[in-house]
Image (cartoon, rainbow, N blue to C red):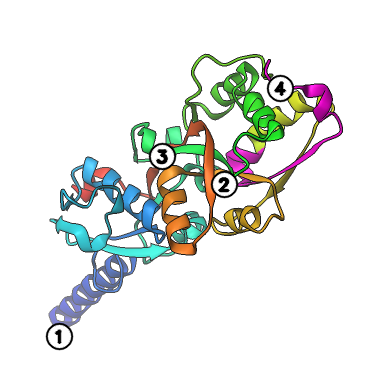
Amino acid sequence: MKRIVSILAVLAVLLTSLVVFASCNGDDGKIVIAIPNDTTNEARALLLLEAQGIIELDDAAGITATIRDITSNPKNIEFKEMEAAQLPQALEDPKIDYAVINTNFAVQAELNPAEDALALEGSASAYVNILCVKEGNETAPKFQALAAALKSQQVADYIKNTYGGSVVSVVENPGDGYDAAIDYEALAGTKISVAASPTPHAEILAIAKTILAAKNITLEIREFTDYVQPNLVVENGDVDCNYFQHVPYLDDFNAQNNTHIVNILGVHVEPMGLYGAEGKTLAELK
């Protein structure tokens, strides 16, 4: 009788362990990775996973890849598509093991990409974050003044000293923040409104704001936490310009929404990162 009780006790322990394991890896025991659900960032996330040897994608998919383009998935990973802003919180869900997160949302969630990410993408030029205006306003002096401020040495130094490599300036030969071709006296008293993500875009713009203020130009920074409204408010004229996105996202947004937003300056790149829930390692995915 004691032996039967002992066997039952062992079985109970084993069953409990299986339940705990399943709860950590999804309902069916699969590894679950959360990825952005917008077209360009989903592709970017999948390309990062492919670069790490975790999956393989159809060669023809490129920067438009979706989970349907996965041709090899040795670990039988399950992918959960989510709004990009919600991905840091996804790591607190016991059914999610990993998440691929944009740097701005990672930093907002107090994650340090340089230290906390299990893997970071390279500084691919396709994903440079850009200053955008509505089509037709590309050469307007006030926007060129803002572009000059963002191309300054002050901004380049701020990015380098503040973000520890998780945000990288792409401006070549930074200047003093001013453009000799602009009549700053004519712009005195001008206000420029810009839609931006809180981190790092609004923080970087704060440096440009100081540069413009020296010429009596006011930069009004309006923060948004999503990837849709910043383009819509520029399209409808509520805000002058925006700084939050990269070119592939902009191209897809314009095509999907019949908007007319254009890029006037590349400022920085934010390497996307793969993050694990507590205790999760990169080795478990390989």
Q: Which residue is mark 4?
A: 182
What is the distance, in whole Å, between disc 3 and disc 4 at their CAs?
29 Å
Q: Is residue 171 above or below residue 10?
A: above
Asked if the stretch drawn in magenta spans residue 281, the answer is: no
Between disc 3 and disc 2, the foreground one is 2
Q: Secondary structure at mark 1?
A: loop
Q: CA distance from mark 1 to mark 2?
A: 83 Å
Quadrant, the N terminus: bottom left
**What distance separates the C-alpha of mark 2 from that of mark 4?**
20 Å
Residue at (61% x, 14% y) in the render: 175
Query: What count of labels does the image hold?
Result: 4
Tell me if label 1 and label 4 are in contact, CB under 8 Å.
no
Q: Which residue is mark 2?
A: 135
> Disc 3 marks which residue?
127
* Comes first in the chain, label 3 or label 2: 3
Crowding around mark 2 (Cα neighbors within 10 Å: few <14, some 14 to 19, many 20+) is some
Mark carried by residue 271: none
Residue kind at label 2, given as amino acid type: Glu
